[in-house]
Image: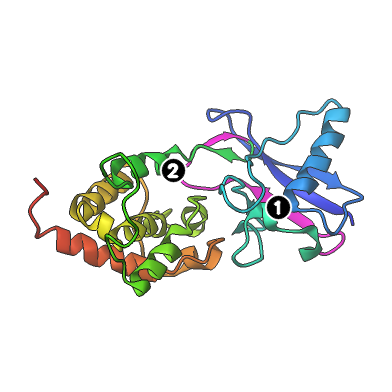
Amino acid sequence: MDFELHVWRQKSPKEKGRMEVYPAKGIHADMSFLEMLDVVNEGLASQGVEPIAFDHDCREGICGMCSLVINGIPHGPERATTTCELYMRHFKDGQKIFIEPWRARAFPVLKDLIVDRSAFDRVIQAGGYVSVNTGSAPEANTLPVPKDCAELSMDAAACIGCGACVAACKNASAMLFVAAKVSHLGLLPQGRVEARDRVQSMVKAMDQEGFGNCTNQYECEAVCPKAISVSFISLMNREYLKSSFQPPAV
C-alpha cells in the first residue's frame, strides 16, 4: 500500500509550524499507524532528513501517549481505538492522510506531533488520589463495595488520560477527563472521605490550566479510545454542586 502523508512539522514551541508532504510506500496493511510512521522515519533518516517527532510508549492502547489527529479525528477514524491500535488496513491504498498534533491552548506543541500534556498531570495532582494509612493490606471484606458502584467506577477508571476529548472539543474542554478521574474515586467508599475537596480542587485546577467549558455536544465521547461515557460529566456536575454546600473536611 502507498500513501501520501501530510504531516505537521514544527521545530519548537516558539517557531511556526507547517504541513509537509511525505510519501509512504510499500506499507503492509497489517502495520499499525505508528509502525507506518517508523518506516517513513527510517526513509527520512536515510535521506538525511530529520525524522518526524511523535509521542509513544506502550503501543498497547494503555498509556495514551500516541496523541495524533488523523484526518481531522483524534486517534483516527476507528471508534474506541488509540493511534497505536489503528491499522493501515483501515485506509485506502493511495489515500492522502493528514496528521496533526492535539490543538488546545493547554496542550502547547513541543515539536512536530508532540504536545505538552502536563496540564493533565497537574489536574491529577490537585486531587486525583485517595489518602490512606500505609501498612499491610486490609481484609477484602472489611469494606464492602456495591457491585453497581464497583462496575461504574471501573468504567471511569478506564480513562488513559490521552487528551483526545480535549482535542475533539471546540472549546478544548477537559470535562470528560476530569469527570472520569473524579468519578472513579468518588464512587468507591474509600474515595468518599475526600469527595468534596477532590471535585472542588480538580475543577479549579482544570479552569486554571485554561481548558474550555463543556457545551454537551458529545464530541469527547465519540473520540474517546476507551469509550468513556459523557454521563460521568453529569455525575461530576452533581458532585460539584453538592460539594459547594458542604463544609470543607476537617
Element assignment for label 1 = strand
Q: Earlier in the sequence, mark 1 or mark 2?
A: 1
Most common SS among magenta residues:
loop
Residue 124: image location, x then y, percent = 36, 44
User: Who is closer to the viewer here, 106 or 201?
Assistant: 201
Disc number for residue 105: 2
Image: 101 above or below 46: below
Q: Is residue 181 left or right of residue 11?
A: left
Q: Is residue 145 left or right of residue 59?
A: left
Residue 138, magenta (yes or no)? no
Q: Which residues are magenta?
A: 92-111
How many numbered marks have been drawn onto this rendered protein structure? 2
Residue type for callout 2: Arg
Badge 2: few (under 14), some or many (20 or more) residues near its Cα, within 10 Å? few
Kindly check if marks 1 and 2 are in contact, taking CB atoms under 8 A apart as contact: no
Q: Is residue 209 visible?
A: no
Q: Which residue is mark 1?
A: 98
Scheme of image coloration:
rainbow
Q: Is residue 124 left or right of residue 50?
A: left
Q: Quadrant of the C terminus?
A: top left
